[in-house]
Image (cartoon, rainbow, N blue to C red):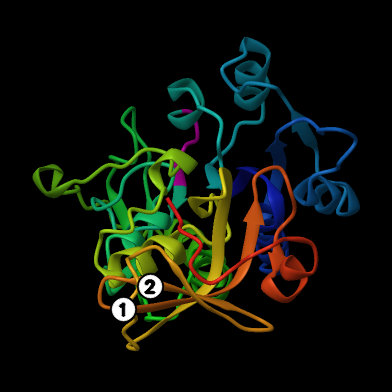
Amino acid sequence: MRIAIIGQSDFGKDVLDALIKDQKDIVGVFCPPDKSGRVDPIKESAQSHKIDLYQFGRLRNQDAIKTFLSLNVDLCVMAFVTDIVPMEIINSPNLGTIQYHPSLLPSHRGPSSMNWPIIMGEKETGLSIFWPDDGLDTGPILLQKKVEIEDIDTLGTLYFKKLYPMGVDALIEAVNLVSNNNAPKVDQDHSAATYEGWCKSEDTKIDWSKPAIEIYNLIRGSDPSPGANTTLNSQKISFYKSYLSSEISEMPYGTISKINQTSFNVSVNGGTLIVERVKLDGNPKLYVSDFLKDHALEVGDILK
């Protein structure tokens, strides 16, 4: 079975490496062009295994389409793809194209499908391996895996500790199902579909009048990116690595109520938010212990 991979970054590399370890016939790897001299990990892996590598700025480019079609691919595996893949490529493999998506489709279609379940306070999510069609994450399901969203999970832990390694394994499982002619195609229930766009900084501004749990979920679902943000002394500041305490402060919501060596507390509706890592706009992320060395912070400061 002749396999082509469209992918990038560490996830794409790990999928490629796992398929090679499984002795699959990889006839081509497609990844984005190098940026600022940085070589993509999947490119390095392809080159080290002497697999033909193709880098096109856009896969909709006619040269990209012709190149893909010339490989006579049996199966295309999409492993972390941010480009728009034309239907000429998706439909060309003899056995089809499969794609990884980090949500339980049809829920959370769209590009930020890991942020939103945490922000919305959901307790479960997962991944889907599906057969892409001409819609956005609308194709038939091949397989799905569920994971618990724990109360301490952030976007980072959910992805790197759960959905990333599980996703690599799931794609290999899916490839083997296709190879053995046992791969399902289960239509999605489009009436139950939800879609959210990119989770951007303007979507993650903290409203201090909201219940404490909603603020906490917003911070978790935006950590490490794009960061839940507020304003301190007319400067935009984003919060990471935060916790909730049931301790109630008499100060107004959004007020700094206590400052410690490694954290500061903010009064919230239903408890206290304990913040251990922050980022001022245009600056690197800092632990509060380092932030306090160069920035004035006082009890009573109001976040807006």
Residue toward you, 125 or 71: 125
> In the orientation shown, which residue stands out farthest toward the top?
62
Whether residue 96 is visible to the viewer of this picture, yes or no, is no
Q: Residues within 10 Å of mark 2 (few under 14, many from 20)?
A: many
Count of all numbered marks drawn on residues in the image: 2
From which residue to which does the magenta span run?
A: 92-98
Report which residue position mark 2 lands on.
267
Q: Residue at x 72, y 69 (%)?
A: 292
Position of residue 203 relative to residue 269, above or below, is above
Whether residue 192 is visible to the viewer of this picture, yes or no, is yes
Q: Residue at x 74, y 54 (%)?
A: 284
Label 1 with label 2: CB-CB less than 8 Å? yes
**Which image quadrant for residue 5?**
top right
Identity, as a three-letter code, of the amino acid under mark 1 = Glu
Position of residue 248 relative to residue 9, above or below, is below
Q: Is residue 215 left or right of residue 291?
A: left
**Of the residues tagged 1 and 2, which is closer to the observer?**
1
Could you tell me what secondary structure mostly forms the magenta stretch?
A: loop
Residue toward you, 300 or 153: 300
User: What is the x, y in percent for residue 72?
Assistant: 61, 31
Is residue 39 found inside the magenta-colored segment of the image? no
Q: Is residue 152 left or right of residue 116?
A: right
* SS category of the residue bearing label 2: strand
* SS category of the residue bearing label 1: loop
User: What is the x, y in percent for residue 48?
Assistant: 90, 53
**Residue 71 numbered mark, or none:** none
Q: Is residue 29 left or right of residue 221?
A: right
User: What is the x, y in percent for residue 250?
Assistant: 31, 78
